[in-house]
Image: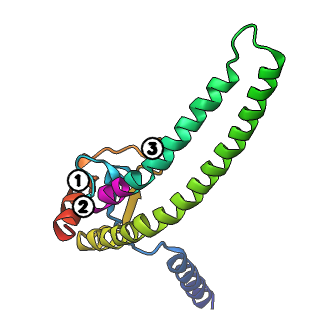
């Protein structure tokens, strides 16, 4: 009877031990990419760089106009010595009006820029993400870390794990 009890006890212990044993998992293959390099004018993703240039070109006139208005505002703020009180009041009033105009133009430009950026750059970024996902799968990468999102949190030991240059070349060759 004792032998049966001990055998049963060992059987129960063995089943507990097997149930708690960690499952064997395949090693995870990790790749690293720096999405900040995608927008680099020299060596970045051509379609993204061109979209950014287009956006910059389209909004340069607004940016220049606002810069000129700010310069005028700054010059109104600097009053020469011995300026009569009537002129001071007039300059102050002009500066206040100009400040309101600057704020309006900045906000209008910000809204327009955001809409245009969404129209120009978002489709390119979506295409880049899809291509990056396919690129990683093609190379058997299980986990892709974007070092531009964690600049201080990633320590890259093997530079060969950085897929950025290879991905940029691949994307540019497939998407001229």
At label 3, counting other C-alpha atoms closer than 10 Å, the crowd grade (few under 14, some 14-19, many 20 or more) is few
Report x, y in % for residue 55. Answer: 40, 56
**Is 126 located above or below residue 151 in the figure?**
below
Report x, y in % for residue 96. Answer: 75, 36
Disc on res. 165:
1
Q: Select label 3 or label 1 by which is in front.
A: 1
Q: Residue at x 64, y 31 (%)?
A: 73
Residue under label 2, please give it.
167
Report x, y in % for residue 113. Answer: 51, 58
Sequence order check, earlier mark of 2 and 3: 3
Quadrant containing the C terminus is bottom left
Q: CA distance from mark 2 to mark 1?
A: 5 Å
Quadrant containing the N terminus is bottom right
Q: Residue at x 49, y 73 (%)?
A: 21
Q: Select label 2 or label 3 by which is in front.
A: 2
- The colour scheme used to paint the residues is rainbow
Element class at badge 2: helix
- Compare residues 112 and 162 and report the one nearer the observer: 112
- Compare residues 8 and 45 and report the one nearer the observer: 45
Q: Is residue 7 left or right of residue 151?
A: right
Disc on res. 151:
3
Magenta highlight range? 47-54
At label 1, counting other C-alpha atoms closer than 10 Å, the crowd grade (few under 14, some 14-19, many 20 or more) is some
> Contact, CB < 8 Å: mark 2 with mark 1?
yes
Count of numbered circles in the view:
3
């Amino acid at each position: 009877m004792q032998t049966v009890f001990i055998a049963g006890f060992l059987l129960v212990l063995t089943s507990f031990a097997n149930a708690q044993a960690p499952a064997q998992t395949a090693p995870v293959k990790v790749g690293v990419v720096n999405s900040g390099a995608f927008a680099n004018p020299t060596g970045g993703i051509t379609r993204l760089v061109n979209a950014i240039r287009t956006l910059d070109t389209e909004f340069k006139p607004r940016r220049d106009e606002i810069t000129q208005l700010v310069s005028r505002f700054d010059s109104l703020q600097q009053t020469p010595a011995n300026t009569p009180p009537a002129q001071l009041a007039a300059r102050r009033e002009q500066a206040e009006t100009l400040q309101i105009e600057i704020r309006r133009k900045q906000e209008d430009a910000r809204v327009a820029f955001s809409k245009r950026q969404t129209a120009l750059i978002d489709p390119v970024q979506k295409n880049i993400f899809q291509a990056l996902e396919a690129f990683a799968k093609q190379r058997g990468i299980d986990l892709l870390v974007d070092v531009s999102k964690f600049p201080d949190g990633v320590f890259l030991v093997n530079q060969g794990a950085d897929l950025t240059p290879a991905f940029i070349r691949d994307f540019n060759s497939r998407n001229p």
